[in-house]
Amino acid sequence: MIQDKETPVWLEQHFPVREDSPEKAGLPYTNSRGLLKLIESIPSQATWHSLLFFLRDSPEDKHVVHYRDPLEAIKALLRDPALAKHIVCKPKCIFTDVTKEKRVYDEMWTSSWWEETQAKLPEGSCVAPVIIAMDKTQLTQFSGGQQAYPVYLTLGNIPSCMLIVFLPVEKFIGHNLSKVAQLVRMHRVFHKSMRLLLEPLIKAGSEGIEIVGGDRHAHTVHPILACYIANYLEQCLDTCCKFGKCPKCLQKQSALGDWEPGELREQVNTLSTIH
């Protein structure tokens, strides 16, 4: 859970500590609707936005994405004073002993990738390795559908995360299409949503952004997408492969148990399905 200096004040105002019985606890709500209103009033670290878009070949189908700007989310995480002492700004090499013959790989900042990426940046800059995670969740009502994909963002050098987007998963998308065409349409909506969401990271990762960290010092950071966490279903969605096949290679479904690895899947394979 992300904490900031305003949240404890909010909790103290709305949920004062009481030593008497629960019936006399003086809770500021009497039903679930009141509770939801209180939850919505919790101070937000990054502003929520709504984006309406459509695909070029189906302008009649509108799709809504509720999101936070990933750069705002990154700045909010890095400027949180509660996380300042946990933030790691440069890679480190850790070894098992003084001989330095065996290297230890543990946290992301101990990885060779971070070390190699840091070496490419201007002096005085640091990497902010972006980690994206998602998993489908069930909703009672969401833009005409019953499900959504919440997407979370964290950085490889802090122990916290932030919800940044709800991706649309409409069940009635392209109702006049075949099942295969509907699946392709859903994949296209997903990929366009993610492209619109993560597009700000391209320029920021290349040129860097100025932030004031939780230590009250100015830093130049380069937010670079380093890791994407998803289960098998989301991996199939990401790569536009059929459920039951391998999202990492082009091996036929009947040969997935073979010892010989298949040809690795590339971006061109996914793009050919989308377009």
Image (cartoon, grey):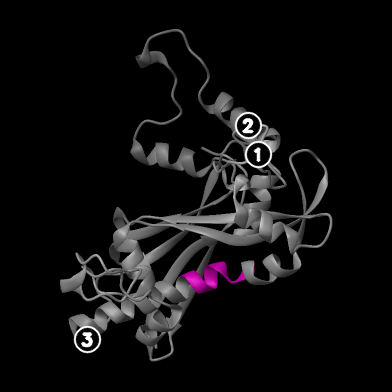
Q: Percent from the top left, x then y, of residue 1?
A: 51, 37
- Is residue 46 visible in the rendered image? The answer is yes
Front residue of this view, candidates 140 and 241: 241
- Residue 16 higher or lower than 174, as above or below: above
Q: Residue at x 41, y 31 (%)?
A: 29
- Residue 268 higher or lower than 203, as above or below: below
For the view shown, which residue lies furthest in the bottom direction? 57
Judged from the image, the secondary structure of the residue bearing numbered disc 1 is: loop
Q: Residue at x 43, y 74 (%)?
A: 191
Q: Percent from the top left, x then y, of residue 264?
A: 38, 74
Judged from the image, the secondary structure of the residue bearing numbered disc 2 is: loop
Mark linked to residue 100: 1
Query: Rounded to the nearest whole Å, what is the CA distance between mark 2 and mark 3?
Result: 62 Å
* Local crowd size for mark 1, using a 10 Å CA cut-off: few (<14), some (14–19), many (≥20): few
Which residue is disc 3 drawn over?
Answer: 177
Quadrant where the C terminus sits is bottom left
- Residue 267 higher or lower than 91, as above or below: below
Q: What span is colored magenta in the figure?
A: 194-200
Q: Percent from the top left, x then y, of residue 219?
A: 80, 51
Which residue is disc 2 drawn over?
Answer: 97
Q: Is residue 196 magenta?
A: yes
Query: Rounded to the nearest whole Å, what is the CA distance between mark 2 and mark 1?
Result: 6 Å
Front residue of this view, candidates 196 and 86: 86
Looking at the image, tell me whether mark 2 or mark 3 is earlier in sequence order: 2
* Local crowd size for mark 3, using a 10 Å CA cut-off: few (<14), some (14–19), many (≥20): few
For the view shown, which residue lies furthest in the left direction? 254
